[in-house]
Amino acid sequence: MPQRTATIKRETKETRISLELNLDGTGKSDIKTGIEMFDHLLSQIARHGLVDIKLSASGNDPHHLVEDVAICFGRALGEALGEKKGIARMGDATVPMDDALAMVAVDIGGRGYPIMELNFAKNDMLGFPTDLIRHFLESFASEAKINLHARVFYGTNDHHKAEALFKALGKALDKATRIDPRISGELPTTKGMLER
């Protein structure tokens, strides 16, 4: 099986991003965005999705930084998946964390469509406004061309809700990107193609 890796670089007047992704990793991460909470949340995707992520990002505005990281992550996912032959395609996970419960379901079907029900208190988690979570997920789903449904069922602590959500995203992506030996070399669709 070919290596499912990607390296994406993006440089604008607002941000500088370098991202390396290995879909068949072990959950290692080396993430530096300058926003500690964002680093922490992204590391949950790596650890619980069993993907390796190396990310260096800088920018003068958290909104654009988060958006551009999401764009790079979406592009990296698409590039690492290649033709998408043999993948499970769909995956979901429901994850508890203390008082919080979150769910993410994804379909790597070639159409970007995010649906979210995120009941955050709109506070600032260590310099990371909770509204940027929605923006990250929307930008990622659009660029990766995946259906992404995310829901925080309940919780009182925004940190716990956010962390459960990113763990669920990692686990859902792990399931969806897994190679199913029963359909090795085939696309998981009745259309005969998965658009990219």
Image (tube, rainbow, N blue to C red):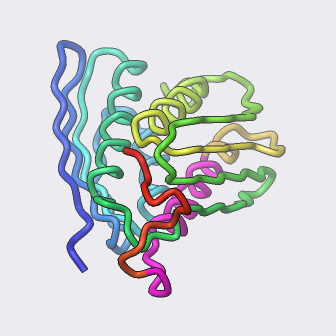
Q: Where is residue 153 in the image (x, y as percent from the top left)?
A: 82, 45
Per the image, is 189 magenta?
Answer: no
Q: Position of residue 66 (x, y in %)?
A: 40, 29
Which residue lies at the image location 38% right of the left edge and 69% below the top edge? Answer: 85
Q: Which corner quadrant holds the N terminus?
A: bottom left
- Give 101 or 2, whichever is nearer the viewer: 2
Q: Where on the picture, by quarter, is residue 125?
A: top right
Q: Which corner quadrant holds the C terminus?
A: top left
Q: Position of residue 75 (x, y in %)?
A: 31, 42
Which residue lies at the image location 81% right of the left edge and 52% below the top edge? Answer: 99
Main secondary structure along the magenta-highlighted residues? helix
Which residue lies at the image location 69% right of the left edge and 37% below the top edge? Answer: 158
Q: In this view, does 141 lie to the left or right of 9?
A: right
Question: In the current view of this chain or complex, which residue is farthest to the front?
Answer: 191
Q: Where on the picture, by quarter, is residue 187?
A: bottom left
Count up the numbered dots: 0
Q: Where is residue 87 in the image (x, y as percent from the top left)?
A: 45, 70
> Does residue 81 appear anywhere in the picture?
yes
Above or below: residue 90 compared with residue 76: below
Q: What's the magenta region?
A: 163-183
Per the image, is 181 magenta?
Answer: yes
Above or below: residue 45 compared with residue 176: above
> Does residue 48 appear anywhere in the picture?
no
Which residue lies at the image location 46% right of the left edge and 73% below the top edge? Answer: 178
Q: Is residue 175 left or right of residue 40?
A: right
- Give 135 or 43, whichever is nearer the viewer: 135
